[in-house]
Amino acid sequence: MSWIRCAGLGLIAALYVLAGRWGFHRLASANPEPDPFLELRLWIVMGGLVLAAVGLVHRAHRAARPGETRLDTQLSMALLVFFGYLCASALWAPDASLALGKLYELVLAGVMSVGFGLAALRQPAARVLDAFWAVVVTATALMALAGVRQLLSGSGGARLAVLGGGPNVFARLMGLLALGALYFWYRRGRAWLWIPLAATGVILALLTGSRGGAVAIVAGVITFLVVGRVPLRRLALLSLLATAAVGVATTLSPLGKALDRSLEERFLRLTLKYEGSSDSESKVYLSGRESLYASAYELGLDNPVTGAGLAAFPALGLGVYPHNLFLEVFCEGGALGLAFLGWALLAFLRSMLRGRRGLDGATVGAVVLVLLGSQSSGDLYDSRALFLLMVMSSCTSVAEAASASPSPSAAACPTVHGAT
């Protein structure tokens, strides 16, 4: 039964990360009315709660065995306090209706993040990670095919995006595809399959023109290499096959011309040579985000301790959201909100250091990917994968570290270790 729970947990976690705000009501008409009960994310979280209850039952009946996941209570507590405080900030929100909608999303994110740690209790860490990354790679690979088809047919817009999502969202998903492919390459081999797939994810991310997404992917891959302690021999193989895959894709397919246009327009002209003012000074083009950042910062300064309240940024007509996770927390939750977010990040860092021998490089790389990406794109709910991945990395790293160095009492009971 363990593999069924792991597969179900991996499926639920991956769908939670990928599904976003999509709902079945969108199938009914071109301009559907939002219906929370028809949104996939609600039922995903409900399924996670069922598995969390099963995990608590397992925890009550026996102790963890080597190689099984363990709950990081400090990280879970920090996340509960962080989400709990942001939910409480709805009490002084300027617009109750907007605050209610955001409160609903915060509850979903908090319940799913902490609930994942409970649902994964007493499960083999490797199986949990395998199931999660298998679903992520499968789903994002299908999206990659849709993106390639869009490019080849010439039906796309100026920037690559699929299924109605934005370019920044697609870039983040392609980053997860690259890290998922590297995960299976590191653990299963078959470099001829996984490395070209990872390179494809990076190429498609560049085709979106998302500069923040490109930086986040590079940081995520570097984190994977460092945390995973990839040997030089395998690193050389990775570099060789990735270079060959990129060369083939850019010289023997239409992707090459599209990639050249994207790099020239988004990464060179807008970033390095953009003339953004009446004077002759060049400046970096930030797609108008600089005004959003300034507005969020000023709003936070007006309410420095507790913030202006949940969803205050859109309620005051400053924009949909600040496009920066820390500024969003600061302007709506104040210095207290930032402190609680910092506590959660520090708890995760402490967990990484404690279980560093069992860290999975791809999962930690995904944390870095989402954290950096959230500084230039999306709102707090769009950063939901950050908190889930922190919990996933923490509970599995402790399990792997314990498996590598079993306790004396565990060594005295070999028959228990072999039980399932």
Image: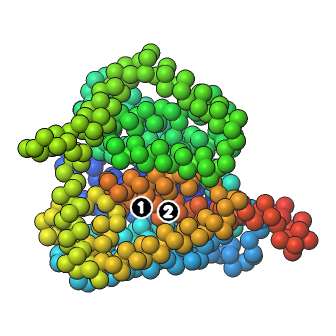
In percent of width and height, residue 408 lies at 87, 72
Q: Is residue 232 above or below residue 29?
A: above
In percent of width and height, residue 244 lies at 55, 23
In percent of width and height, residue 43 lies at 43, 62
Tag 2: amino acid: Leu
For the residues labelled 1 and 2, say whether their Cβ atoms are less than 8 Å apart.
yes
Q: Is residue 55 above or below residue 138?
A: below
Whether residue 338 sits left or right of residue 319 in the image: it is right
Would residue 60 be seen by someone viewing this image from the given angle? yes
Tell me, for residue 384, which label it has, or none. Answer: 1
Q: Nearer the viewer, residue 245 or 291?
A: 291
Q: CA distance from mark 1 to mark 2?
A: 7 Å
Would residue 124 be seen by someone viewing this image from the given angle? no
Q: Is residue 132 above or below residue 326?
A: above
Name which quarter of the figure residue 165 lies in: top left
Whether residue 93 sits left or right of residue 343 in the image: it is left
Tell me, for residue 234, which label it has, or none. Answer: none
In the image, farthest residue toward the left: 278
Q: Secondary structure at mark 2?
A: helix
Tell me, for residue 388, which label it has, or none. Answer: 2
**Residue drawn where x is 53% and y is 45% of the image:** 221
**Residue drawn where x is 31% and y is 22% of the image:** 153
Name which quarter of the figure residue 144 lies in: top left
In percent of width and height, residue 248 lies at 49, 19
In the image, farthest residue toward the right: 412
Tag 1: amino acid: Arg
**Residue drawn where x is 8% and y is 44% of the image:** 278
Whether residue 95 sits left or right of residue 43 in the image: it is left
Q: Secondary structure at mark 1?
A: helix
Q: Nearer the viewer, residue 282 or 235?
A: 282
